[in-house]
Amino acid sequence: MRDINSLNKVTLIGRLGVKPELRYLPQTERPVAKFTMATNERYFNPSTNESDIRTEWHRIVTWGKLAEFCEKYLNPGKQIYLEGKLRTRSWQDREGNKRYTTEIEAQNITLLGKRDEQIEDQAYEEPKPPPDLPEETAEAPEETAEAPDKKKEDEDEVPF
């Protein structure tokens, strides 16, 4: 239950540092994925009169179907929008000392960037027409598919 005067919410836009590592918990077989994400911030450095970029790295944890989604579709360098909350967990190191780690538990991830970046690792095959259609009907979608690309090319050109 959330206290009415508190809120634990994180919103980030950044790029993945590594491919998500997917594991399954031993007792429940619940999927969990972990990865890092970088966010950049531009700031003005008065001593050099130049603007610099500061990169902040975040540890991200996802659970369940979102973890499986991350492992399948996210790659290093991919830009994403992430919503989640901060979680601090404790653990023991090899010497028996109690350590703490603060991570972002992602609840929602949206892929950003160009579409071709989203599917760069997946093999793409042209869809095959159903076997019961005549060949003339099967060729019609190809013609339709080419027309929007040509129209998009024309839209991208600047007249001046």
Image (spheres, rainbow, N blue to C red):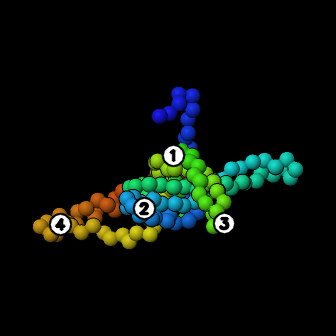
Distance between mark 4 and mark 2 Cα atoms = 42 Å
For the residue labelled by badge 4, is the local secondary structure a helix, a strand or a loop?
loop
Q: Residues within 10 Å of mark 1 (few under 14, many from 20)?
A: some
Looking at numbered disc 4 in the image, what kind of residue is underneath it? Pro
Q: Residues within 10 Å of mark 4 (few under 14, many from 20)?
A: few
Which numbered marker is on residue 25? 2
* Residue 30 visible somewhere in the drawing: yes
* 1 and 3 marks in contact (CB < 8 Å): no
Give the residue at x 52% y 60%.
Answer: 34
Q: Is residue 22 left or right of residue 35?
A: left
Q: Is residue 108 left or right of residue 140?
A: right
**In terms of depth relative to the viewer, which is nearer, 121 or 130?**
121
Looking at numbered disc 1 in the image, what kind of residue is underneath it? Glu
For the residue labelled by badge 2, is the local secondary structure a helix, a strand or a loop?
loop
Q: Earlier in the sequence, mark 2 or mark 3?
A: 2
Q: Residue furthest right?
A: 47
Distance between mark 4 and mark 1 Cα atoms = 41 Å
Q: Nearer the viewer, mark 2 or mark 3?
A: 3
Distance between mark 2 and mark 3 Cα atoms = 24 Å
Residue ID for mark 1: 83
* 4 and 1 marks in contact (CB < 8 Å): no
> Residue 80, how many percent across, how many down?
52, 54
Q: Nearer the viewer, mark 2 or mark 1?
A: 2
Q: Residues within 10 Å of mark 3 (few under 14, many from 20)?
A: few
Q: Is residue 6 left or right of residue 141?
A: right
Quarter where residue 126 is shown: bottom left
